[in-house]
Image (cartoon, rainbow, N blue to C red):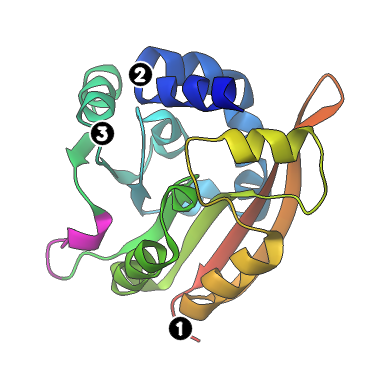
Amino acid sequence: MRIIKKTSRLMTNVTAYRLWQAPFARAKMAPVLQYNDLRAVRRVLDVGCGPGTNCAYFAHADYLGIDLNHDYIEYARRRYRREFVVQDVRDYRPPEGQPFDFVLMNSLLHHLSDEDTHQALRRLRPLVCSDGHVHVIELVMPERACVARLLAAGDRGDYARPLGRWNEILSEHFCPVVFVPYPVKAFGITLWNLVYFKGRGEH
């Protein structure tokens, strides 16, 4: 477990993060692509955007990526030439009258405690326009012992939660439209159990 934890800490390095995540990036986004027509997206807020990997899906849209990691943001600016800022979503204030129709949080909340998670989600609600949605991809802690549970327990995020707990937390702040658990596999083995949540701001 210590080895896994030490390896996961390397992910704060841009190169290490990209090499580790690249083979699985498309698989993680699969339900987002399945349940949405990204061509219709107008304005995107990518919360916890990392080194900017997700922005390629939104080349046609007005895009903003925010993350607390300065190295990630500097890399993303150089590589993708889109708008990226170092920012905590809990403190983010968009220009007045400019909400987002697509707010994405890809594997961020399992790094946050329950209190911080609720603060982040409360902050997101007024950022989503009336016809927009929040889209959350998160790491699920399996109930039973397996490879996926071992990897989840060793992740640098200390707050991987069981599926039911994710449903409770996310549904408290957004009206569920889609809630779909799914695996990410390699060589027939489930490496991670994830969940995709799509929600409206109005209950």
Magenta span covers which residues? 89-96
Question: Does residue 191 sit above or below 32 in this rendering?
Answer: above
Mark nearer the N terminus (1 vs 2):
2
Question: Does residue 184 sit above or below 130 in this rendering?
Answer: above
Distance, label 1 to label 2, CA atoms, is 37 Å
Distance, label 3 to label 2, CA atoms, is 10 Å
Q: Amino acid at mark 2?
A: Val
Taking the image as drawn, is residue 161 in sight? yes
The front one of 137 and 98 is: 137
Report which quarter residue 95 is drawn in.
Answer: bottom left
Q: Which residue is painted at 66% across and 55% down in the image? A: 35
- Outermost residue on the bottom side: it is 203
The front one of 105 and 129 is: 105
Q: Which percent across, then down, holds residue 202?
A: 45, 83
Q: Which residue is mark 1?
A: 202
Q: Amino acid at mark 1?
A: Glu
Q: Amino acid at mark 3?
A: Asn
Q: Nearer the viewer, mark 1 or mark 2?
A: 2
Name the secondary structure under disc 3.
loop
Mark nearer the N terminus (3 vs 2):
2
Mark nearer the N terminus (1 vs 3):
3
Q: Which percent across, then down, holds residue 120?
A: 34, 63
Label 1: few (<14), some or many (≥20) within 10 Å?
some
Q: Which percent across, then down, holds residue 137?
A: 56, 50
Q: Which mark is residue 14?
A: 2
Q: Which residue is mark 3?
A: 69
Q: Which residue is painted at 36% across and 39% down in the image? A: 49
Q: Main secondary structure of the magenta part?
A: loop
